[in-house]
Image (tube, coloured by chain):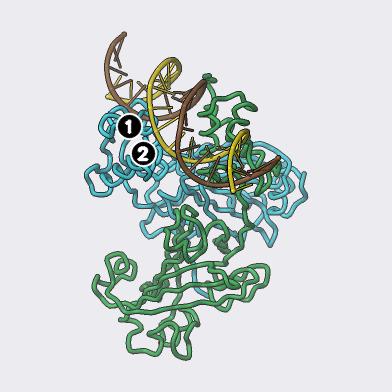
Chain colours: A cyan, B green, C yellow, D brown
DNA sequence: TCGAATTTGTGCGTATGTATC
DNA sequence: GGATACATACGCACAAATTCG
């Protein structure tokens, strides 16, 4: 059916969006099912599906297979402390990435040796092809994934030491600064470069979103006496979290 | 075709994404048309369409009706230093927001008195309805707008002083820290909370993007002896800039 | 200038797998 | 187990924009 106006799926999406905005469909309620949308709006299955997809891409609703499509709560974004300072709430960060307000975090990690590519070599100040330890992390905050990270450490620094594998040994999971201290590498500086972009399908599969949801990316590099000893990409969904930097002035 | 693995449209999207990443499909080139994707990957029309939609949501490609689907250009992001440290390049920041690599910046500003709303009052630790000076800035970097900001200062702090208007007087345009110092307010801390979201139409009108482009939002608050003396929202297009934090460890 | 071919975007109907209730 | 609902997938049709001979 051509209307000469807006596509049908956008009309349906707009109507449902309005019902969400004015509170007629409050958070946690179920949208009309695809079949009911088809009936109520007199549209086809495809149009009903497309309309739901628009709202999902906007982050307003979330589809649960087999159950329904639910209005999402507009979450008050939580702060992730990024500067060694403790948030005012008095949470006890036992690791930098864990410093979320009131969080009780867990994580998975998987390490693998590889050769440094162009970009990683540049960030670590080594030659492309030099061997590095790559570790992929998934951080969870009370069950749900909140952050994925990939870190690279030059084996020239950690190779043949007890801390070569970030998650093994007595210092497993202790954080870069402590692990480096154990091999007499004194980390004294960190540079974090914050960017943001639409998330990739793989990332959002893990973080619980749909392709296109905005993520923040922190490129973090730790330095010891001016030399990079670790670099990492940290990816956080932007609709649920904020990065909090507390800095002294001058 | 069920694979028990990844959905077909994600497989196709991943493959095309890889071709974009490794330069085999450079910016401004055309993706294979939907019909060709269908043939090359042996998938249906729907899968080819869905795969293109994923890449469009990720901002990697853009569809032009009647013409094709084109790989978008990815500008190399420039760094904006966000701490008292100078970037290694040796740029001379004459003001915090100006500390862009190699930038020659200018700005416009317009100030107005108003009553603090709920959120601003909370951020400044004052009562809603208390009077504040609101200033809107547009920062330009060599002609093109790179950043818009809105700042709020409580008139309880700056009222009836020479620095009440941020851009007037002998200290006009000098930065919050210097202006506050002139009235014996010693700014000693700053908190920056970084978030990101799709840009609003009005923001992107100024910043020169298309609707849907991602922006980063920095909520910055300056403190003097624990009391907020200025707060601001800084909006930066995420495709062109990165926020660079250089922090000491411990 | 015209028209044909191509390509995207929208839309329809249907089928199947699988998660949830 | 059965019913419901979402997610994926196939095939087709057509309008509008673009390209090109």
Secondary structure of the residue carrying tag 2 is: helix
Residue B116, above or below C19: below
Query: Same subunit under labels 2 and 1?
Result: yes
Mark 2 in CB contact with mark 1 (< 8 angstroms): yes
Return the residue nearer the eye: A166 or A208: A208
Chain designation of label 2: A
Report the Cα–Cα distance between label 2 and label 1.
8 Å
> On the picture, is A177 further left or further right than B227?
right
Residue D17 horizontal/vertical position (percent):
52, 46
Residue B188 lies, with reference to residue B216, above or below; the image says below
The x and y percentages for residue B31 are 63, 39
The label on residue A43 is 1
Q: Nearer the viewer, residue A160 or A27?
A: A27
Q: Is residue A205 visible?
A: yes
Viewed as shown, does residue C20 lie left or right of A204?
A: left
> Quadrant of the image for the N terminus of chain A?
top left
Disc 2 target residue:
A8
Residue at 59% x, 53% y: name it: A219
- Viewed as shown, does residue B85 lie left or right of A64? right
Answer with mark 2 or mark 1, whichever residue precedes in sequence. 2
């Amino acid at each position: 059916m051509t209307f000469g106006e807006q596509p049908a799926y956008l009309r349906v999406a707009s109507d449902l969006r309005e019902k969400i905005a004015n509170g007629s469909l409050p958070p946690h309620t179920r949208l009309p099912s695809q079949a009911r949308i088809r009936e109520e709006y007199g549209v086809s299955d495809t149009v009903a599906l497309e309309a739901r997809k628009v709202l999902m891409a906007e982050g307003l609703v979330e589809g649960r297979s087999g159950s329904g499509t639910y209005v999402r709560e507009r979450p008050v974004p939580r702060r992730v402390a990024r500067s060694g300072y403790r948030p005012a709430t008095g949470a006890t960060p036992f690791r930098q990435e864990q410093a979320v307000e009131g969080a009780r975090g867990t994580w998975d990690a998987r390490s693998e040796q590889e050769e440094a590519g162009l970009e990683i070599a540049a960030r670590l100040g080594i030659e492309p092809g030099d061997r590095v330890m790559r570790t992929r992390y998934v951080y969870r905050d009370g069950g749900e994934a909140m952050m994925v990270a990939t870190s690279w450490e030059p084996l020239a620094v950690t190779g043949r030491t007890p801390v070569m594998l970030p998650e093994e040994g007595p210092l497993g999971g202790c954080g870069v600064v402590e692990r480096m201290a154990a091999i007499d590498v004194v980390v004294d500086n960190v540079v974090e470069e914050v960017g943001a972009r639409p998330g990739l399908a793989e990332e959002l599969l893990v973080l619980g979103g749909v392709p296109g949801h905005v993520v923040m990316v922190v490129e973090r590099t730790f330095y010891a006496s001016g030399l990079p000893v670790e670099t990492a990409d940290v990816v956080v969904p932007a609709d649920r979290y904020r990065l909090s930097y507390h800095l002294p002035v001058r």
